[in-house]
Amino acid sequence: MKKVLYALLIFSGNVISQNASETFYSTRIINAHSNEMLGDKVWQYRIEHRFGDMLGDAGGATAGFGFDNAADIRFAFEHGLTDNITVGFGRNKGVGGIYPSSLLEGLVKVRLLHQNKEKKIPVSITVAQESYYSYMKASPNVQSIANFPEASHRLMYGTQMTIARKINDRASAALIPSYTHRNYVLPFEKNGLFSLGAALNLKVTKSFSLLAEYFYAFEDAEIKPIETNSMALGMEWNTNGHNFRICLTNARGFGTVQYLAENDSRIADGQLRMGFSITRDFKIRRRK
Amino acid sequence: MKYATIGIIIFSFAVIIGCKKDKVPEPKMEPVEVVCTDSISFQQKVMPLIQNKCFSCHANGTQPVINDYTTIVSQADLMLKTMRGDGVSLMPQGGPALPEMDIKDFNCWIKQGKLNN
């Protein structure tokens, strides 16, 4: 009888899980959004960190190869309103330098398509919309981007569509068209920037995978040199409710705007850094 | 689900109406009368000056990129303003300003047509 029940359970599981699962282990690939969503009523707490330059002028042994400095730090809460809608709120340090720091971040992410062999849907598609508000003290220098003559100049936006496919149990890939908009930019910059990203996930074991991600920015090389395009390699461990990822990247910030439009780090100059992300999922159930 | 949909519509609306396309204003500068008597050589005067004072940052990632004749020509007017700190941040960053003689040479090179001579 037990065997029959197990068989029924396995069979019903197969029927229910026709949608491709675990295309990626987490809702982020490395910097970019993956096609994964938080489940219905699931809360997720995220702590993410990018260290300073490993090499170059700001790195080297005297800076602990970047471990003595913080390029960016994010704390965020995200919540699955349904299986197909996730909202989030976060706080980033921001890339700093000439760009605004101290960012509040809002996120709405929606799943439009879910890869399904039975229904012949070949890919999963999600759209993530991020908005940022810089609460830093305005600079008195009118030539500074952080001068913020109007309150709306503190706002920035990032939109990212993730088109992902689970190729087999070992490999997944994604194409990630992205658009960022900053309300206030330097004279030589443009407000809008379109980028196209590509990402790969190779599962080595059931809970460990390798990740790679690259973004090409469609922008004049004089405004944004090609070497400053965001690229990242990572390793990810997934356990029940926890996800831990370490990465090596030239990107300084976490938000779509920060690592796509405001990143000026070049690997050739030693401006690459270690980073990590830790997430914890939990469900809050109401008392009946 | 109904509340989620309403929330997302409000969020999307706020994003759309919040969008602006503003830029930091270009620095304004009063014209300075400079009398140029000698021809200024790019290779002998301008390039060594920029190499010494600007390349350490602007040829290594800091925007705008300044690393050769073409990039110097495209940024020359802004560079002159930053050398004087006239309405813009003074460069080299943190000062001191370049010697007045060097600024004058750079200004004359611009006036003489930014030649690659």
Image (cartoon, coloured by chain):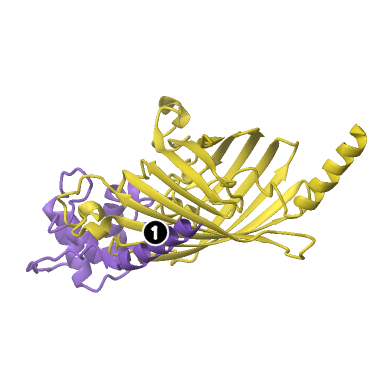
Chain colours: A yellow, B purple
Along the line of sight, the residue nearer the viewer: A282 or A263: A282
For label 1, the residue is A157
Between A271 and A132, the residue placed more toward the observer is A132
The number of callouts visible is 1
Residue A31: x and y, percent? 52, 47
The residue furthest front is A288
Q: Residue placed at 27% from the left, 64% from the top?
A: A187
A154 to the left or right of B29: right
The answer to whether residue A130 is above or below residue A209 is below
Could you tell me which secondary element the residue under label 1 belongs to? strand
Judging depth in this view, the residue of A65 and B72 nearest the camera is A65
Q: Is residue B101 visible?
A: yes
- Left or right of B87, for residue A233: right
Q: Residue at x 35, y 46 (%)?
A: A104
Residue B40 in sight from this viewpoint? no
Image location of residue A41, percent across then percent down? 54, 44
Residue at the (43%, 35%) spot, across then down: A52
Picture quarter with the N terminus of chain A: top right
Judging depth in this view, the residue of B49 and A212 nearest the camera is A212
Q: Residue furthest bottom?
A: B113
Image position, residue A18 (x, y; %): 76, 54
**Vertical comparison of A55 with A34: above or below:** above
Residue at image coords 36%, 67%: B16
- Give coordinates of residue A38: x percent, y percent: 57, 46
The amino acid type, in three-letter code, at marker 1 is: Tyr
Alpha-carbon neighbours of circle 1 within 10 Å: few (<14), some, or many (≥20)?
A: many
Left or right: B85 as drawn, with respect to A80: left
Q: Chain of mark 1?
A: A
